[in-house]
């Protein structure tokens, strides 16, 4: 896929989605939202990719957030439809059986921050900033911002950011455990994601997908129900060839060669 707002490239085992609208600083139009979702769906089905990486080509911005010129003219049903399109991306990232990571080099605001929060792993440069500026325009976050951050952290911090519209630094989010790592330069962040992809190449992709599904679903359940969900997932992992290969390699004291993909076991 290649259009004026996003592009897809595949490097080694990474499927890279680049947001690329300099004019709007990657503000989120309906078209861009649909294209991001389609790109994730496409890369999830591509067996040559183990990691999906969201990034921006615009220096200083991952995304400026909602396209205010566009949404300023929406009526109530149209606004709900716009919110639905954004929420679709959040659910697509959460339900994707591959690792979805993002690298931030600059500002991730509003919907851009919400998309980043949905990712499994988040890397950023030290000078990056994050926030929910919606209250400055008489609206609230609409892609999951009122729900995602307090599921990762705690309610009072989420309320502070949403109520004030203030921006927060990468350092603060790193200290709170929201960001996995921060770097001085974007090139360092990109290098770290490449190293991660090399590491994941050696792991069981089926097990990673199953673990992600188990973690994400468990977060929405009471503990007892989540533990039962994990037990069933653990049982399902024993149906894979990767389990046999992993255990055999352990006994033979060699490096395992995993071949199973989550795509091959969707019926489990």
Image (cartoon, rainbow, N blue to C red):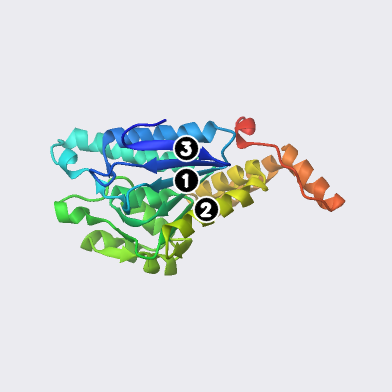
Say which of 147 and 255 sits in front: 255
Q: CA distance from mark 2 to mark 3?
A: 15 Å
Question: In the image, what residue occupies the spot 22% across and 51% down?
Answer: 140
Q: Earlier in the sequence, mark 2 or mark 3?
A: 3
Q: Visible in this render: residue 268?
A: no
- Which image quarter: residue 235? top right
Residue under the point 28% across and 51% down: 110
Expressed as whole percent of the image width and height from the top left, the position of residue 212 reads 55, 47
Q: Is residue 119 above or below residue 236?
A: below
Which numbered disc, 2 or 3, marks the residue closer to the eye? Answer: 3
Q: Secondary structure at mark 3?
A: strand
Name the secondary structure under disc 1. strand
Q: Which residue is mark 3?
A: 9
Q: Is residue 62 visible to the viewer in this orientation of the structure?
A: yes
Pick the residue in front: 139 or 192: 192
Distance from disc 2 to disc 1, alpha carbons, whole Å, reads: 8 Å
- Occupied quadrant, residue 266: top right
Which of marks 1 and 3 precedes in the sequence? 3
Task: Point out the residue furthest to the left here.
Answer: 73
Above or below residue 257? Residue 163 is: below
Percent x, y of residue 252: 86, 50
- Disc 3 + disc 1, Cβ < 8 Å: no
Instruction: Please state if 38 lies on the left or on the right of 231 as rendered.
Output: left
Does residue 136 appear left or right of residue 2 in this picture? left
Q: Which residue is mark 1?
A: 53
The residue at the point 26 percent across, 56 percent down is 132
Mark sitting earlier along the chain (2/1):
1
Mark 3 or 1, closer to the camera: 3
């Amino acid at each position: 896929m290649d259009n004026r707002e996003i592009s897809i490239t595949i490097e080694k085992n990474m499927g890279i989605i680049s947001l690329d609208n300099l004019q709007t600083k990657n503000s989120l139009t309906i078209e861009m939202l649909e294209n991001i979702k389609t790109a994730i769906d496409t890369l999830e089905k591509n067996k040559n990719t183990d990691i999906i990486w969201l990034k921006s080509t615009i220096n200083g911005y991952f995304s400026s957030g909602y396209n205010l010129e566009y949404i300023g003219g929406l009526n109530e049903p149209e606004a709900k439809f716009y919110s639905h399109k954004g929420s679709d991306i959040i659910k697509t990232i959460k339900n994707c059986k591959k690792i979805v990571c993002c690298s931030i080099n600059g500002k991730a605001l509003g919907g851009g921050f919400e998309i980043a929060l949905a990712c499994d792993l988040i890397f950023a440069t030290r000078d990056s900033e994050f926030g929910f500026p919606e209250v400055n325009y008489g609206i609230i976050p609409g892609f999951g911002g009122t729900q995602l951050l307090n599921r990762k952290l705690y309610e009072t911090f989420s309320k502070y950011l949403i109520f004030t519209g203030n921006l927060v630094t990468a350092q603060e989010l790193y200290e709170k455990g929201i960001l996995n790592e921060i770097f001085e330069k974007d090139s360092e962040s990109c290098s770290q994601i490449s190293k991660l992809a090399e590491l994941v190449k050696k792991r069981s992709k089926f097990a990673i997908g199953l673990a992600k599904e188990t973690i994400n679903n468990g977060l929405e359940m009471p503990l007892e129900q989540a533990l039962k969900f994990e037990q069933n997932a653990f049982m399902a992992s024993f149906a894979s060839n990767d389990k046999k290969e992993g255990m055999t390699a352990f006994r033979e004291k060699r490096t395992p060669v995993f071949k199973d993909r989550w795509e091959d076991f969707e019926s489990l």
